[in-house]
Image (cartoon, helix red, strand yellow):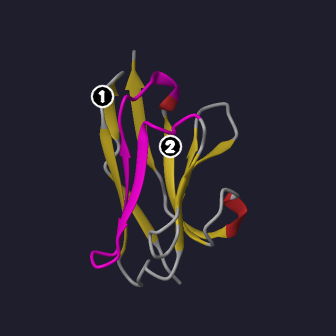
Amino acid sequence: QVQPVESGGGWVQAGGSLRLSCAASRRTLSRYGMGWIRKAPGKEREFVAAISWSGDRTTYAASVKGRFTISRDNAKNTVYLQMNSLKPEDTAVYYCAAGIYSTNERTYAYWGQGTQVTVSS
């Protein structure tokens, strides 16, 4: 069983950037599709981005397309989410999840604990 661990969250002003990382200590992430899903206070969980196991396919939510970039380095067993031009509405807990490449969060079986991203206006 793989256990993703997120890092890189924090506080940033609107227009700024953050890079989230997701690693796994016990097993490799390379065989899994990987997704980022976020949960804002008072809102439902929202799919953000996903990348296939090989990295040849990516997909994004409309709300982040053009601002966020998902990537992976299987040699480092790490997945990244580069977030640029951040907006206050991007404030949420961001979860990294491993499973089947999809925009549907239900296809991801293994989830990290989440990392908080706060964007101030």
Tell me, yes or no, if residue 112 can be seen here. yes
Q: Residue at x 43, y 42 (%)?
A: 68
Furthest-front residue in this view: 56
| Secondary element at image label 1 | loop
Q: Where 82 falls versus 73 (above or below)?
A: above
Looking at the image, residue 12 sits to the left or right of residue 61; the answer is left
Q: Where 89 falls versus 82 (above or below)?
A: above
| Residue 23 screen position, x and y as percent | 36, 68
Q: Where 27 falls versus 66 (above or below)?
A: below
Looking at the image, residue 68 sits to the left or right of residue 110; the answer is left
Q: Residue at x 42, y 84 (%)?
A: 27
Q: Residues within 10 Å of mark 1 (few under 14, many from 20)?
A: some
- The numbered disc on residue 93 is 2
Residue 64 on the magenta span:
yes
Q: Residue at x 68, y 34 (%)?
A: 43
Residue 60 on the magenta span:
no
Q: Amino acid at mark 1?
A: Gly
- The numbered disc on residue 89 is none
* Nearer the camera: disc 1 or disc 2: 1
Which comes before the other along the chain, label 1 or label 2? Answer: 1
| Residue 32 screen position, x and y as percent | 52, 77
Q: How much space separates mark 1 and mark 2, taking CA atoms?
A: 17 Å
Q: Which residue is mark 1?
A: 16
Furthest-top residue in this view: 121
Q: Which residues are magenta?
A: 63-89
